[in-house]
Amino acid sequence: MESVPVRCPACRRDHAYSTPVYPCPCGAPTTPPVLRGAPVVPITHRTWNDDWVTVCCRGCGRLDQWPQPELCCPCGTVLRIPVRPVTAHDATVAATEGTRPARPSHIPLPRTAPPPRPAFRPRPIHTARDAVTVAALYLTWLGYHDVVQPTERSPARIDLRATGLIARVDATTRPTALRDVECLWLHALTTSARSVLFSLAGYAEDAEERADGLGIPLFTTDLTGTPQPVNAPADELIGTGA
């Protein structure tokens, strides 16, 4: 996994950004070619074309659409990481390599240790409804087998419920705020339930600190539909399950 230096233009904070690795259907790991030294761009609004990039698999030459690399700075700015566009040469190589037999997709990648449960199968996110669906699938994967989505969203903005659990899914383009964390916690307190938060744009620094203190698991979800733990309570939930 390649790491590139990134500086937030808003707060001038330096980050080490690790490029994501996606599984090509041929089985080879695929990584968007990040442009080293190119300035990052703060995201103020989203469009479909800006959220996806074309990436060429070095293993089989296949061209696929994968999420545009992004980084959420603790200052609240979401940064778009520049990626080298696919060139005519890349397309020519892809066309040539695409005629070759692909490697069997059923060959498993090596693992250092068996996972505690079957690997979670992500689902691409294109809409806010998709984000809620992915969160429901993920909670089910964690062991909550009665996850339901309320027919009408409550004033507390609860998106998912299960026995002893409530969850909110923030599909907006701004980092989840402190108020959202505290409102979810208060509602969970009145219903004697555990609360979980999913966010597409990450969390404000004070919101993350408050969630740590309250023991609320925080997850971020990228456009591939893969939730990632943000804090220690989330790591603990993954380890123990429901």
Image: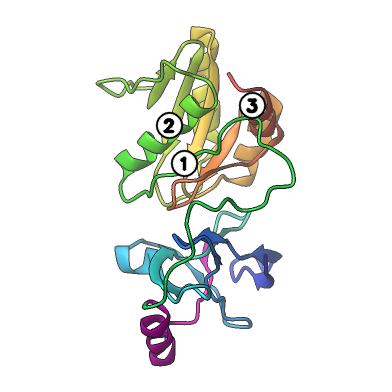
Disc 2: CA contacts within 10 A as few (<14), some (14-19) or many (>=20): many
Q: Which residue: 36% across, 78% down?
A: 99
Disc 1: CA contacts within 10 A as few (<14), some (14-19) or many (>=20): few
Q: Which residue is disc 1 drawn over?
A: 121
Q: Which residue is disc 2 drawn over?
A: 137
- Report helix, strand or loop for mark 1: loop
- Report helix, strand or loop for mark 3: helix
Q: Which residue: 69% across, 48% down?
A: 111
Image x and y of residue 55, in percent: 45, 73
Q: Is residue 219 above or below residue 80?
A: above
Q: Which residue is disc 3 drawn over?
A: 237
Instruction: Describe residue 81's horizontal placement relative to residue 98 as left or right.
Output: right
The three-letter code of the residue at mark 2 reads Leu
Q: Is residue 222 visible?
A: yes
Disc 3: CA contacts within 10 A as few (<14), some (14-19) or many (>=20): some
Of tags 2 and 3, which is closer to the observer?
A: 2
Q: Is residue 84 magenta?
A: yes
Image x and y of residue 21, in percent: 57, 61
Q: Quadrant of the rendered structure where residue 206 is?
A: top right
Q: Nearest the camera: 90 or 97?
A: 97
Image x and y of residue 27, in percent: 52, 60
Image x and y of residue 39, in percent: 57, 79
Q: Is residue 227 above or below residue 65?
A: above
Alpha-carbon span between mark 2 and mark 3: 15 Å
Of tags 3 and 1, which is closer to the observer?
A: 1
- Report helix, strand or loop for mark 2: helix
The three-letter code of the residue at mark 1 reads Arg
Q: Which residue: 54% across, 31% down?
A: 181
The magenta span reads 78-98
